[in-house]
Amino acid sequence: MTPATTDRERPFNNLLRRFNATDFALIDAALEPAEAMADELLYNPGDNIEIVYFPCGPSLVSFLVPNEDGRDVETILVGREGAVGGIVSHGFLPAYTRITVKVGGPFVRLKVSTLEAAKAKSLTLRHLFARYADCMLAQMFQSTACNAIHSIEQRTAKWIIAAMERTGSDLVPLTHEQLSTMLGVGRSYASRVILSFKSAGILETRRGAILIRDRDALARHACLCNEAVKAHFDEVLRGVYPAEPQNA
């Protein structure tokens, strides 16, 4: 299990690492280490957001929008590059989406009230979270465009690569059913794409997961939406978005 902190006692979260020493000191004592399991629910739509969660190491969180037919469609993933819950809130803020843990592991928790008090004391901290909120919004815009114009194959390859980059692993926990839910398509369509990648030697299936064998080939099937999002992160918050898979 990847530890929640580095040798320097900073949580292994790139956004928190971006804090300057003065800003980090404002919240350091209030950060609470935690472990979360895959599929653990953080927020339902309408819940009052009182805690900010910072994924650490390989932990990964998914934003899901519920629909009237009972399906949840994924909008974005958040890993160690960011945080979820109460990022730019001031007081009461109900959750709009369902927020769940996609890949379990270490997190650090922080009360929204503590973060707000710290931002009230620091202009640089307010600016940092405003820039991160801009990056999240760009990710949502890109996801909307991707869902509208790109094929299921392109979107599947894009999602797998995004998960690999954030978790630092070639083994991605993903079932056909989960993929179909995330993409908003029937299970047969999702299964067809996975089987085509498997036949091409790009990946192997495992129980509840897929193992990537040829990342370069997978990238050739993906759209360029991940690259657009990474470029924006790099422009606005250089060094925060994980660039390549790595064993952390």
Image: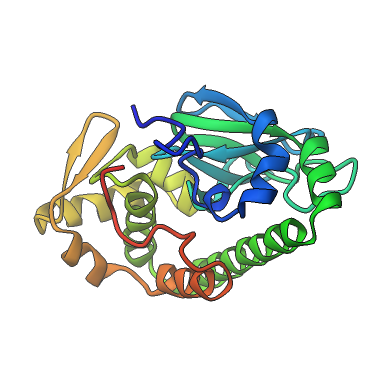
Asked whether 135 or 3 is in front, the reply is 3
Name which quarter of the figure residue 94 lies in.
top right
- In which quadrant of the rendered image does the N terminus lie? top left
Residue 193 vs 175, above or below: the answer is below
Q: For the point 39% across and 50% down, which residue is it? A: 166
Q: Which colour scheme is used?
A: rainbow
- Is 217 left, or right, of 228 in this rendering? left
Outermost residue, right side? 91
114 on left or right of 206: right
Q: Position of residue 140 (x, y in %)?
A: 60, 63
Residue 43 visible in the displayed image: no
Q: Which image quadrant for residue 134?
A: bottom right
Question: In the picture shown, does residue 177 fall above or below 163?
Answer: above
Q: Which of 128 and 166 is in front in this view?
A: 128
Q: Where is residue 2 in the image (x, y as percent from the top left)?
A: 36, 32
- Above or below for 70 versus 221: above
Identify the residue at the far front of this view: 22
Looking at this view, is 216 or 69 the one in front?
216
Q: In which quarter of the image is the C terminus?
A: top left
Q: In this view, does 236 lie to the left or right of 85?
A: left
**Residue 62 image offset from top left, x and y in percent:** 53, 44
Residue at 72 percent across and 50 percent down: it is 87
Can residue 211 be seen in this snapshot? Answer: yes
The spot of residue 219 in percent (x, y) is 25, 67
The residue located at (72%, 56%) in the rendering is 125
Tally of marks: 0
- 195 left or right of 228 in image: left
Q: In this view, does 90 lie above or below 58?
A: below
Q: Which residue is drawn at 54% across and 65% down?
A: 143
